[in-house]
Amino acid sequence: MQSLQNDRYLRALLKQPVDVTPVWMMRQAGRYLPEYRATRAQAGDFMSLCKNPELACEVTLQPLRRFDLDAAILFSDILTIPDAMGLGLYFETGEGPKFERPLRDMAAIEALPIPDPELELGYVMDAVRTIRKGLNGQVPLIGFSGSPWTLATYMVEGGSTKSFNIIKKMAFAEPAALHLLLDKLADSVILYLNAQIAAGAQSVMIFDTWGGVLSPRDYEEFSLRYMHKIVDSLTRENEGRRVPVTLFTKNGGMWLEAIAATGCDAVGLDWTINIAEAKARIGDKVALQGNMDPSMLYAPPARIEQEVQSILAGFGTGTGHVFNLGHGIHPDVPPEHAKAFVDAVHRNSQQYHQV
Ligand code: CP3
C-alpha cells in the first residue's frame, strides 16, 4: 500500500497536530485554469470529461501542479447520481445543469432505480482508481456527493432555481413523495460514497448547497435527517486509516450544533459566519473547514493575505482547521491569486501550530 507523503489534511480533520494549516479550494479544478479549458475542449462537453477517467485524472491533478495544495478532489459532479437514475442530465451553455425528465409525482419517484455504483457509476470509480495512481501518495484524495435534499432540488425543479417553488410545493403539499425521493437518494449516496471509499477516496465530503433555503424545522426534516442517515452508514476506516466525513451546508451557520451532532468529523463553513464563533460553538466536537469569501480572490494578493491572516487568527491556536473558500472558486479569478491564497495559508499558519 502506498504511503502518504502529506497527510496534513487528514490529520487536521481528525483534530491531530499538524505543522501548518492544510488548504484546498472547492472547485479547484475548473474554468479559471487555462489548462482545464484546454482539456475540456479535448473531451468535448463537461459530462464527457467526467466520464473519461484519464482526462478526469488529468484535470484533478492540474491545480496540484500549480499550487501547494494539501488535498486533491475527485473531478466529477454531484449530478452523476440523478443522471444514473435516468433523468437525462445535460448542460446548456451559460445556464447550468438541466434534466430532460424532471421528477414531478409519486409514480415517477416510485419508479426510480437505485444505481449500482460499479455499473452505472463505474466511470466515477474508475476515475477514483486512476487518480489514486496518478497522485502516487502525494496528497489524499477527497471523494464527494451531493446531499439528498440538494440533489432533489435539481431533480424536481429540472435544473437550477432561485425560488425553489416546485420542490417546496412537493415538500409541503406532497411530503410523502418527497420523503420517498430523499430516502432513495440517501440509499444511493451511501452506496456511491462507500464505493468511492473502496476505490480509494481517503475522505468524503457531502455538499448540501441548498439546505440553507429551508426553515430550521424543514432543514432538520428534509435535509439534515438524510445526511445523518448517510453518516451513520459510511465506511469509516479503510487502508488502516480513518476516513473522515465533512458535511457542508451552505448558509447553515444557524445549525452548526445540529450538523456537528450527526457524528461527522468536520463541518464546512461558508463565509457568512465568523470562524471564531463557529469554533466556540462546535470546535470541541468536530474540525472546521473554511471559510474565505471566494470573491476575495478578486482582490490583490496583499489583501488576500490580510484576509487569510484574519481567518487564521479567528481560529487561533490548536488543530482542527482545514482552510478553504466558503464556496467554489469563481471562473474569472486569476490563477496567480489562487496561488497567493494557498501560499498565504501555509506562510501565516505556522505560528498557530507547535510541533
Ligand atoms: O471541486 C472540484 O474541483 C471538483 C469538482 C466539482 C464539480 N462540481 C465540477 C464542475 C464538484 C465538487 C462539484 C460539485 C457540485 N456540482 C455542486 C456542489 C458544490 C457547489 O458548488 O455548490 C453543485 C451544486 C453542482 C451542480 C453543478 N455542476 C452546477 C450548478 C454546475 C454549473 C456551474 C457553472 O458555473 O456553470 C455544474 C458544472 C460543473 N461542475 C463545472 C465544474 C468544473 C463547470 C463545467 C464546465 O466546465 O463548464
Image (tube, rainbow, N blue to C red):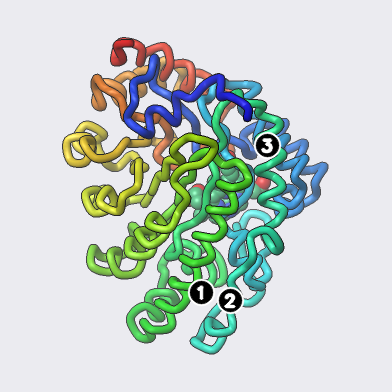
Question: Which one is earlier in the sequence, the residue at label 3 or at label 2?
Answer: 2
* Image location of residue 238, percent across then percent down: 52, 41
Q: Which residue is at the front of the view, 107 or 32?
A: 107
269 versus 115 height, above or below = above
Q: Which residue is at the front of the view, 186 or 169?
A: 186
In the image, what residue occupies the spot 52% across and 53% down?
145
User: Within 10 Å of the Cα at label 3, are there few (<14), some (14-19), or many (20+) other Cα atoms?
Assistant: many
Q: Amino acid at mark 2?
A: Pro
Question: Which one is earlier in the sequence, the residue at label 1 or at label 3?
Answer: 3
Whether tag 1 and tag 3 are in contact, CB under 8 A, the answer is no
Q: Amino acid at mark 3?
A: Ile
Q: Which residue has dot 1 on it?
A: 156
317 relative to 101 in the view: left or right: left
* Image location of residue 260, percent across then percent down: 27, 48
Of badges 1 and 3, nearer the viewer stands 3
Q: CB at mark 3 closer than 8 A to ligand 1?
A: no
Pick the quarter of the image with the N terminus. top right
304 relative to 60 in the view: left or right: left
Give the mark count: 3
- Furthest-right residue in this view: 42
Question: Quarter-wise, where is residue 344 in the image?
Answer: top left
Q: Tell me the number on the disc at residue 102.
A: 2
In the image, what residue occupies the spot 46% across and 41% down?
243
Q: Secondary structure at mark 2?
A: loop
